[in-house]
Amino acid sequence: MHATLTPRANFKLIALWCTLLTACAMFSSRSAVLPFVAFGTAGIVAGMLQTRALLGRRTSFLRAETALEVRRALVATLPGKLAVAMVWVKAAALLALVLSQGEYANVQTILGCYAAFALARECASLPGVFGLARAS
């Protein structure tokens, strides 16, 4: 099983994203809460889809030894394809925020939105990661 599919790796990522989100929240305007919540909500959905993919194709993920094999196993399921699509939609939304040159077009808000999505996705995908750990 690839190292990124272990609970330990996920907890490290959760700590990283939590730290980044906290720092961004401290230095962003109060109104940035709305985009943080929106991206966090999208991250929860992506994480739940990822969990469904992980639990639906356990053997494929357990056999995966490279990041490419993990990606291949992920997109072999509809929930996995949707989770990957959500990552691309998130990237497009972040680009739109930057190009809007509006209130949210600043480094701390953009990074905070990214961190909110990633943190929520990692937390929501933990049941799938623990399911893989039990199966290995």
Image: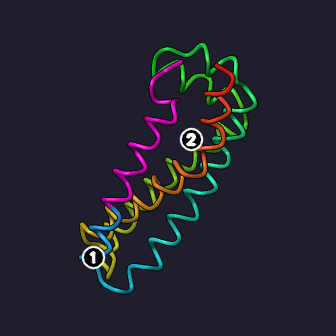
Are there few (<14), some (14-19), or many (20+) residues within 10 Å of tag 2? Answer: some
> Is residue 81 found inside the magenta-colored segment of the image?
no
In the rendered image, which residue does mark 2 sit on?
84
Q: What element carries label 1?
A: helix
Q: Say which residue appears at 40% left-offset and 44% top-offset.
A: 13
Q: Where is residue 116 in the image (x, y as percent from the top left)?
A: 44, 62
Name which residue type carries label 1.
Met
Q: In this view, does 42 lie to the left or right of 127?
A: left
Q: Where is residue 130 in the image (x, y as percent from the top left)?
A: 62, 36
Q: Say which residue appears at 65% left-offset and 38% top-offset.
A: 128
Q: Say which residue appears at 60% left-offset and 35% top-offset.
A: 129
Name which residue type carries label 2.
Val
> Is residue 9 found inside the magenta-colored segment of the image?
yes
Q: Say which residue appears at 35% left-offset and 86% top-offset.
A: 30
How far separated are the C-alphas under marks 2 and 1? 30 Å
Seen in the picture, residue 51 relative to 5 is either above or below; the reply is: below
85 or 48, which is in the foreground? Answer: 48
In the rendered image, which residue does mark 1 sit on?
26
The quarter in which the N terminus is drawn is top right
Seen in the picture, residue 91 relative to 31 is either above or below; the reply is: above
Seen in the picture, residue 5 relative to 122 is either above or below; the reply is: above
Q: Is residue 25 left or right of residue 86?
A: left
Q: Where is residue 135 in the image (x, y as percent from the top left)?
A: 69, 22
